[in-house]
Every structure is written in C-alpha cells, then in structure tokens.
Amino acid sequence: MFRSRRSLSARQLWRRRCATPGRGQGEGAPPTPEEPHHALRPAALQLFKKLKDEQLWRLAEAVESKGRWDCGCVWFPPEGRPSKQASAAPSVLLCKLYRWPDLRGAPELKRLLHCENYWRRGGEGTAVCCNPYHFTRLAAPESSDASSYKTRETVQSALSNPLHSITNQETTYCNVRGIHDTTLSRGSHKDGHWCKLAYWEHRTRVGRLYSVTEPSIQIFHDLPKGSGFCLGFLGSEARSEMVRRTRKKIGQGLILSHEQGEVWVYNRSEHPVFINSPTLAPVNARGQSVHKLPPGYSIKVFDSQQAERISRCSALGEGPSDLHSVRISFAKGWGGCYSRQFITSCPCWLEILLSTPK
C-alpha cells in the first residue's frame, strides 16, 4: 500500500506541474503559452518509469519543497540512461522541467557540494543523481548589461560614509581609500577555518563574526530544517522598517562553498543578491565591479590565482585594498545604477572575510 502511494504521489506531482504556470524570472524566463514542459512530456514519462518508487518519492518531496530542505539524491539507474540520440541527460531534463524552462544544456549547470555525486566520480556503470535542486545555474562572471556595473569609492565619500562606525563587539580599520581593512580580525587557515562571516545592517554590524570550517555553509533568515548561519536569530535594538522588510526577503539566503581554492555563492532565495569581489573584475580594472546574481544562480566570487595576479598588478592602487574580502547585499543593489552609492547604504549585507594562507 505504501509503495503504491509513493508512485501515485509522483504522478500527481507531474499532472500538477503540467497545469501550473512557470515560476517566472526567479528561475528561468516566464514560459510561453505553449509551456515548454509539454514538449518534454514523453521523455519525462520515460524517465519516471525508470526511477524506483523511493526515488520518485524523493523527487516529489524536493520539487514540492522547492529545495527548502535537502531530500537526498534522486538516483537514476545506469541501465536507464538515455541513448546518445536523447535530447537531454536526466539532470538537464528535470532542471528544465521544474526550474529553468530556457535551460540549454549541462554546461550551464553546476552540481552542489551536498550532492553525493559531487564527491564520488563514477563511470558509465554507476547511478547518477538527477535531483534538480542539487544543481545551480551558472552566472557569467562578467557582463555588459545592467546586471554588472561599476562603482567607485573615493576618499571624500569615505569621509562622509565611514565604515568604521560600528557599535558592536569588534572594530575594523579604515584606510585612506575608504575601504575597510579587516586583516587583523580575519585569521589564517592555521586557525582551522577558511573564512569568517560578518552580517551588517547599514553601517552597523549585528552579531559576532561567524567562523566557517566546513566546505560549505548555509546563510539564511528562514529555512526549514536549515543549519548554518541563521540571520533570523540576530537581534538589534535599532532596526528600521526598511531593514525589517529586507530581512524578510533573505528567506533561504545563500550557500557559500569553498572548492579547491575557489569560493562559490549560490543564491537560493527568491530575490537577487549583489556581489562585490576583487576577483570578479579584470586584473587591470579601475574601480569596483558590483554583480547582480538572480535567484537560482551561482557565481565564483573568489579565485586564489586571480587574486595573486591582481596583487602583482601595479595598478592595484585604484582597486580594493583587501583582496580577500567579498561583500554581498541582499535584495538591494548599490552603485551607479542605483540611488545607493555605497554598500553601507544597503539595509542588509554580508561580508566574507577569507582566511589568508600562512
């Protein structure tokens, strides 16, 4: 009886998905009236037939929760893999069906660290995970459209908008270019962590520095069954209405991961985040780049090799003073395209203080 209920749940989920409009700009462009999933129906039905009931049940839970909690891997058997003539791999098919209708292929996807397939590299004779919420869509590091724009912080702006106005436990230090230097509070890999996190509301840091030792960390405001850095638990006596509204938009927040000298950010909330990192810009870039990361997308926010190249660049004086600091604003952008010129004007933002090797 339990076995048949599981299969029925997956079939009901499929019928509900066929009758439900797309999710909109959060994860893929709004579908046309022809609904792209109708074209995927024959291949998807064949895929569902090859999944065991346990895997169908996990897939149903993952899709119904929209990734709010990890339901585990959905294993597709090696004997059920599509032929070379098939239009898409199981993971691509399910990502197109449930997340990004305009997805073109596997090169646009990145597997997340909590997926077992990330750690075990198998050949043709092994099962593969096709849970669509074990993937994120890659965002281009550089763009010429409005999603990427430049902003510059000068000495004069620093004097009128200082980052050293901190009311909490620790003090960061401001240099002459108006970009705070946090090397004294960062630490190194020998301390057992690869980064520290600081949460800010405007110019005030809320809570203590959060040390990260695991390869990946969830940063969120409201996430069922979530573990990691919960911003919802951080209280503040002087919190404006703007900050309260923005905090509610953090939702599932981010997944921050450290992967072989690279740091990745996956935006799992329903609103965009805005990122400033020295390694997102070209080596000789003047000023600072701020990148918009849509929901469902991920981007490499730090590259150790790129940071080394920048440190050797003679034009470093025009760029950020701290090559191991990444700043992320939730829901609100700053820079030349917005009324907020500086990240300290953003209601809620996060600072990632990467540990330096010693």
Image: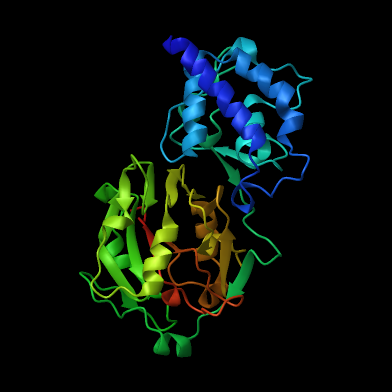
From the top left corner, tell me how far across and down residue 8 is, in percent.
Answer: 53, 18
Residue in the foreground of this view, choosing between 43 and 213: 43
From the top left corner, tell me how far across and down residue 105 is, in percent.
Answer: 70, 36
Q: Is residue 234 above or below residue 134?
A: below
**Which residue shows up at 35% across the image and 68% down it?**
200
Split into 4 quadrants, where in the image is the N terminus?
top left
From the top left corner, tell me how far across and down residue 67 is, in percent.
Answer: 47, 39
**Which residue shows up at 66% across the image and 41% down it?**
108
Can residue 117 be seen here? The reply is no
Q: Pick out the residue farthest to the left.
A: 169
From the top left corner, tell me how far across and down residue 27 is, in percent.
Answer: 61, 47
Q: Is residue 231 above or below residue 20?
A: below
**Which residue shows up at 69% across the image and 49% down it?**
30
Can residue 157 be seen here? The reply is yes
Left or right position of 198 against 290 = left
Residue in the foreground of this view, choosing between 73 and 22: 22
Total labels drawn: 0
Specify the color scheme: rainbow
Q: Is residue 106 above or below residue 157?
A: above
Residue in the foreground of this view, choosing between 71 and 218: 71
